[in-house]
Image (cartoon, rainbow, N blue to C red):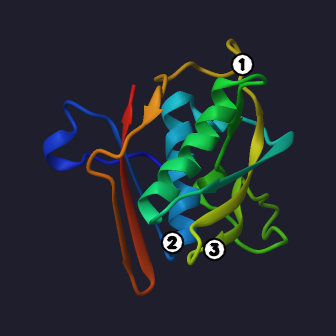
Amino acid sequence: MIPKPWNHILSVYPRIHAWGDSLEEAFEQSAMAMFAYMTEIEYVQMTESQDIEAEGHDILSLLFHFLDEFLFLFCAEPFFIARLANALVVLSSTAEDGEIEKVKILEFDRENFRIKARGYGEEFVIGKHPQGTEVKAITYSNMQVHENEGHCELFVIIDI
């Protein structure tokens, strides 16, 4: 997913604009968009996986903590980065057409605002992976979740 311009704030603040057919898919896509800021995703191979758990007090805080957990995986050793091939996240337990899940929501509890997810990727290595923009933090600034029947969009401003 390549982030799109976001009207009045693009020139000042980079942001993630993710979408999907469901809230779960939009969350998965938001993690992939964040990693796309850090490197060219096509260079990342899926040789290992890392699991994260996050919780919040509402859907916005859950999104914040979800992205923050994946950001922590990148910032801490072994500098894990996940990828998304062909802009597709396979939501079934088995991959279709040879695809492997890249960021996969394992559990999504909307009532208690808890999430478990798995990212597929590898350790980020300078020289193998082109260095993109360092994401320093996720922010709550103008964070938005728009959920309609059959479509969900997320907007998150990141600090670089």
Q: Nearer the viewer, residue 156 or 141?
A: 141
Residue occupied by mark 3: 109
Dot in front, 3 or 1: 3
Q: Secondary structure at mark 1?
A: loop
Residue occupied by mark 2: 23
Q: Nearer the viewer, residue 5 or 115?
A: 115
Q: Nearer the viewer, residue 100 or 57?
A: 57
Q: Position of residue 6 (x, y in %)?
A: 23, 48
Q: Is residue 82 above or below residue 159?
A: below
Residue 43 in view of the camera: no
Dot in front, 3 or 2: 3
Residue occupied by mark 1: 128
Say whether disc 2 or disc 1 marks the residue closer to the N-terminus.
2
> What residue is at 58 percent from the left and 51 percent from the top?
66
Q: Position of residue 75 (x, y in %)?
A: 64, 25
Q: Secondary structure at mark 2?
A: helix
Q: Amino acid at mark 3?
A: Asp
Q: Secondary structure at mark 3?
A: strand
> What residue is at 49 percent from the left and 22 percent from the top?
134
